């Protein structure tokens, strides 16, 4: 009986090109290569590694101690002002933090809470007076703190939080209150045990006017006794689905008073007499400006998700090049897993997407650094950064979860063992899809930005023009740099399967197909929503709700296009011809994989003919087979050593086991003492009966 797992001959597909692993590794390290390497060295130290099997209380203690190690190694202060011991290096700071996921995701996230959220809130929302007063203690861990924004009843809807901070003119204090149970601050890192202070987000009320969400610095615990201060309540979230080295908890406030000067007042201030003032007159714009300063968390999660995907693929592909299973192609030697087409289909498209995500993240990081360094810090720059971070964080964190799960399954029972990292990493990264903005909500934010840009471009056009655009008659229209690109929508068939496959691998064809999908989806949704603004609020909301899924899918398509473009841009920076040829094919696997994933849309909308569609899967399979000899080099270029992988099956032990088994059976077959296979006896008997 023929084995259903049929191996693909990789040697026959080899085109002679090779990967310059060192040069590719340098490209992947990006602008902040030295910072990344220093952070990886730190993440490789055993004292920072996650120890499996600890109780959550033991894990919390270990992670808090590890924060102290980071402080001593000057590994966490890069973003803070030079005058306070930092280096004003915002991009480098995030690049370094991302690598901590290799040691323990709990360490990365708890460090992110302390310095990336709590510290950054004081840095970006406060004045120099606030910074001088509190940042030194935050930086050296004398003041462990919380970022108290999320409420259990309002999750991602920050504008609707219910905690209030009401100004009392008589005492010149803000009185902070939690009015009902759904307004408890929830999932707050450092709240259960370690936090001595918090930046608390609340509705700012003065002279009877609610000025919207603002942030205040609030002392939570007595630094000596660690007991909550009067009026503050807390609950421990205890064991979670992952990240149990972080002491998440709930916080509530009952007439807690803080001085007027504890308001972090960079964007909104209250005078002693209760007069409110702000340099930003629009309450909505002020709110989004304040939240925009805290985009660092999304950027960090995006990078950490890329790193986790790299680690998973290095482990799984290393194992797949060593583990042998079934002997359909030989009576003597079993087949290496990665020679099977299905295994290539499982892992190599994920590898292509990880490369795309890595290159896109580098562009995001450069954008982030430009905004926060002040080099490129206009309102438009900040809006672009917010949109880009929301789009990429969503796709990349989902991709990391998919990658960890597929790598786990591709390694069979060994993948399920905690010692091989997949299950632990996936549990810890699970919540990445939720915090710093639920991924689905973030994509809705992206979609609204796309619609806003679209409406600016087409505000003076009638519905007939919009309709013609949707069906491809306005192909020369170009939208702005948020991601909607010029596209020639009509792709003529060439008459043969070979030419159709060649057309699909063309870079311009891929760009046109991917960009066309974004444009068309946004245009269709804009047309559907065109009349909503003129209707009563409840009817307009109903129309929006009817189109919500289409909006989110358009945003996802936009983010996929951004990743493809980042990959394509990176190809231009590769000098070695062999590496460029191989990476171009990897980019094609990513781009054509997106088209295959959404093939129903392309067929239904007449963008691809049935003939061309039939050539897509076979062509991708050929690309995968061609990529198979280079897979190990492509994951080696990630630059992770054994101290980062810490997976038994990636240590070379599987190759040793397989070689030992092969030698055993080879010797057994050559020996006259070995047992005879029953099947051979049956064959001999049949042969004798015919004589």
Image (cartoon, rainbow, N blue to C red):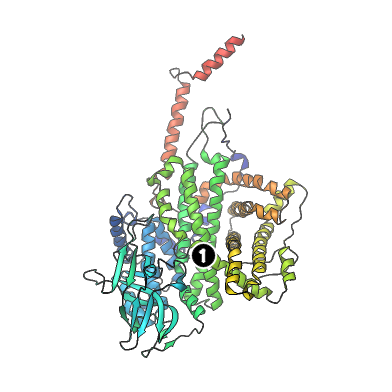
Instruction: Left or right? Give the position of 289 relative to 620.
Output: left
Along the viewing direction, whichever of 577 and 375 lies nearer the viewer: 375
**x and y, in percent, of residue 64 in the image:** 30, 62
Give the x, y percent position of residue 329.
57, 31
Compared with 103, 346 (above or below) is above
Residue pictured at 74% horizontal, 49% vertical: 499
User: Is residue 651 at least partly visible in the picture?
Assistant: no
Is 339 above or below relative to 207? above
Q: Secondary structure at mark 1?
A: helix
Q: Which of 543 and 268 lies nearest the eye of the viewer?
A: 543
Measured as percent of width and height from the top left, residue 573 is found at: 58, 61
Q: Residues within 10 Å of mark 1 (few under 14, many from 20)?
A: some
Closer to us: 615 or 462: 462
User: Does residue 466 sit above or below 660 in this rendering?
Assistant: below
Q: Residue furthest right?
A: 495
Where, quadrant-wise, is the C terminus in this rendering? top right
142 left or right, relative to 642: left
Query: Residue under circle 1?
Result: 441
Residue 2: quarter of image: top right
User: Against 139, is 64 above or below?
Assistant: above
Query: From the image, which quarter does the N terminus lie in?
Result: top right
Residue 403 rendering spot, x and y as whole percentages: 49, 51
């Amino acid at each position: 009986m023929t084995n259903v797992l049929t191996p693909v001959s990789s040697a026959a597909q080899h085109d002679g090109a090779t990967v310059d692993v060192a040069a590719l590794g340098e490209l992947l390290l990006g602008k902040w290569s030295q910072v990344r390497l220093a952070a990886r060295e730190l993440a490789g130290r055993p004292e920072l590694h996650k120890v499996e099997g600890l109780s959550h209380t033991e894990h919390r203690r270990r992670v808090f101690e590890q924060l102290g190690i980071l402080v001593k190694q000057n590994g966490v202060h890069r973003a803070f002002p030079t005058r306070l011991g930092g280096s004003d290096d915002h991009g480098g700071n995030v690049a370094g933090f991302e690598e901590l996921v290799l040691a323990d995701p709990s360490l990365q996230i708890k460090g992110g809470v302390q310095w990336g959220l709590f510290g950054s809130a004081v840095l970006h929302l406060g004045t120099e007076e606030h910074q001088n007063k509190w940042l030194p203690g935050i930086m050296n861990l004398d003041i462990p703190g919380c970022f108290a924004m999320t409420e259990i009843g309002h999750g991602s809807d920050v504008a609707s939080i219910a905690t209030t901070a009401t100004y009392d003119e008589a005492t010149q204090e803000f009185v902070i209150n939690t009015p009902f149970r759904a307004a408890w601050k929830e999932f707050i890192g450092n709240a259960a045990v370690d936090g001595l202070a918090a930046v608390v987000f609340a509705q700012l009320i003065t002279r009877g006017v609610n000025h919207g969400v603002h942030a205040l610095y609030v002392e939570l615990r007595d630094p000596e006794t660690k007991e909550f201060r009067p009026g503050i309540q807390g609950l421990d979230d205890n064991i979670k689905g992952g990240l149990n080295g972080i002491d998440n908890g709930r916080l509530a406030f009952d007439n807690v008073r803080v001085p007027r000067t504890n308001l972090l007042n960079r964007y909104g201030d209250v005078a002693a007499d209760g007069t409110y003032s702000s340099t930003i007159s629009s309450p909505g714009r002020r709110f989004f400006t304040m939240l925009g300063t805290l985009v660092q968390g999304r950027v960090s999660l995006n990078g950490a998700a890329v790193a986790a995907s790299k680690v998973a693929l290095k482990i799984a592909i290393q194992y797949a090049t060593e583990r042998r299973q079934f002997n359909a192609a030989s009576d003597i030697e079993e087949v290496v897993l990665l020679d099977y087409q299905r295994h290539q289909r499982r892992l190599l498209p994920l590898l292509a997407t990880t490369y795309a995500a890595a290159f896109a993240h580098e562009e995001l990081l450069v954008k982030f650094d430009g905004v926060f360094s002040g080099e490129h810090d206009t309102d438009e720059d900040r809006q672009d950064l917010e949109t880009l971070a929301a789009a990429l964080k969503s796709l990349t964190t989902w991709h990391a979860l998919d990658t960890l799960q597929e790598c786990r399954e591709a390694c069979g029972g060994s993948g399920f063992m905690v010692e091989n990292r997949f299950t632990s990493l996936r549990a810890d990264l699970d919540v990445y899809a939720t915090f710093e903005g639920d991924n689905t909500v973030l994509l809705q934010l992206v979609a609204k930005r796309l619609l806003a840009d679209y409406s600016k471009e087409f505000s003076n056009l009638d519905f007939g023009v919009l309709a013609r655009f949707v069906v491809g008659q306005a192909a020369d229209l170009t939208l702005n740099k948020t991601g909607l690109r010029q596209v020639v929508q009509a792709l003529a068939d060439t008459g043969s399967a070979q030419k159709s496959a060649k057309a699909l691998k063309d870079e311009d064809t891929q760009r046109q197909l991917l960009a066309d999908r974004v444009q068309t989806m946004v245009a269709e949704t804009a047309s559907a929503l065109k009349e909503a603004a003129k209707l009563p609020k409840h009817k307009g909301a109903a129309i929006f709700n009817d189109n919500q899924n289409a909006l989110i899918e358009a945003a996802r398509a936009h983010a996929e296009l951004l990743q493809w473009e980042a990959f394509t841009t990176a190809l231009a920076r590769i000098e070695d011809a062999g590496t460029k040829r191989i990476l171009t094919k990897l980019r094609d696997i990513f781009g054509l994989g997106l088209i295959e994933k959404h093939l129903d849309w392309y067929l239904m909308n007449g963008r691809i003919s049935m003939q061309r569609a039939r050539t897509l899967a076979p062509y991708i399979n050929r690309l995968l087979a061609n990529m198979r000899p280079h897979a190990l080099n492509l994951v080696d270029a990630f630059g992770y050593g054994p101290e980062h992988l810490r997976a038994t099956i990636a240590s070379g032990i599987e190759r040793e086991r397989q070689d030992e088994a092969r030698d055993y059976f080879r010797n057994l077959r050559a020996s006259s003492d070995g047992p005879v296979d029953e099947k051979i006896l049956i064959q001999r008997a049949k042969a004798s009966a015919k004589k």
